[in-house]
Image (spheres, grey):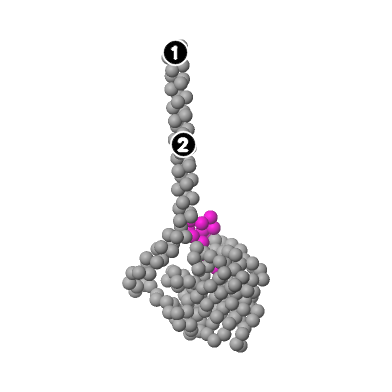
């Protein structure tokens, strides 16, 4: 009888130990995942800062802060500066939506229309860094684009997530600014981009 009680007690102790180990592993995994997600923005900034210290490779594009007209710009040249007092945006925009442009600020899609044109102008940036303020944009907010010798005013009318690979706008939408914040691979929205849409309401200097 005592042997049965002893074996039963041993089994109960074993189950308790196994339960504790499983709980510990679950907590450790949860803490590790949370730490990785929280550290990702800093890690991205660190990688970008390290990349900037190395000599430029032939495949990379250097950026220039000399402001030039979009229709005359070459890859890496600055075509605009965007800012908004409403949601804290302050960002240069360089020709070319590539990792070099977005490492320094944002990249203008050269296949889209230029700033102040009659079509759709689109720029892309990292949602963890320079385009992070886009998540706070609301309808009615004003975005100012400084280009060559004038300023353009755009009013935000929509902001939403759109699946990667989908056309975010209609080609015949008129004079409009579309800004896209690219999501991290570790984000729950990694398969989407966050888009802010704004219509041109004022063309100072025209």
Secondary structure of the magenta portion, mostly? Answer: loop
Q: Is residue 74 above or below residue 195?
A: below
| Mark 1 crowd level (few <14, some 14–19, many ≥20, 10 Å Cα) | few
Residue at screen point 32% across, 72% down: 55
Residue 22, disc = 2
Residue 186, disc = none
Q: Secondary structure at mark 1?
A: helix
Q: In this orientation, which residue lies closer to the viewer: 179 or 133?
A: 133
Residue 96 falls left or right of residue 202: left
The x, y position of residue 25, in whole percent, is 45, 40
The x, y position of residue 7, in whole percent, is 43, 19
Residue 197, located in which quarter of the rendered image?
bottom right
Residue at screen point 64% across, 81% down: 202
The x, y position of residue 100, in whole percent, is 42, 71
Give the mark count: 2
Q: Earlier in the sequence, mark 2 or mark 1?
A: 1
Q: Is residue 175 above or below residue 21?
A: below
Residue 109 falls left or right of residue 49: right
Residue at screen point 47% across, 49% down: 33
Please tell me whether residue 185 belongs to the stretch shown in magenta. yes
Q: In this orientation, which residue lies closer to the viewer: 128 or 73?
A: 128
* Disc 1: which residue: 2
The x, y position of residue 195, in whole percent, is 58, 66
- Residue range (magenta): 180-191
Q: Secondary structure at mark 2?
A: helix
Residue at screen point 50% across, 75% down: 92
Pointers 2 and 1 in contact (C-beta within 8 Å): no
């Amino acid at each position: 009888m005592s042997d049965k009680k002893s074996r039963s007690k041993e089994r109960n102790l074993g189950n308790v130990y196994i339960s504790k180990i499983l709980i510990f592993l679950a907590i450790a995994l949860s803490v590790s995942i949370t730490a990785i997600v929280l550290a990702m923005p800093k890690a991205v900034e660190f990688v970008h800062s390290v990349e900037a210290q190395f000599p430029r490779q032939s495949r990379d594009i250097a950026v220039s802060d000399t402001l030039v007209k979009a229709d005359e710009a070459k890859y890496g040249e600055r075509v605009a500066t965007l800012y908004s007092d409403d949601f804290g945006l302050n960002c240069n925009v360089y020709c070319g939506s590539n990792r070099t442009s977005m490492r320094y600020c944002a990249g203008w899609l050269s296949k889209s229309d230029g700033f102040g044109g009659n079509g759709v102008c689109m720029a892309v940036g990292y949602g963890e860094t320079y385009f992070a303020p886009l998540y706070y944009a609301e309808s009615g907010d004003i975005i100012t684009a400084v280009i060559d010798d004038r300023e353009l005013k755009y009013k935000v009318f929509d902001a939403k997530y759109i699946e990667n690979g989908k056309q975010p706008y209609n080609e015949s939408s008129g004079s409009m600014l579309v800004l896209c914040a690219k999501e991290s691979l570790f984000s729950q929205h990694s398969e989407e981009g966050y888009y802010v849409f704004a219509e041109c309401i004022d063309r100072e200097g025209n």
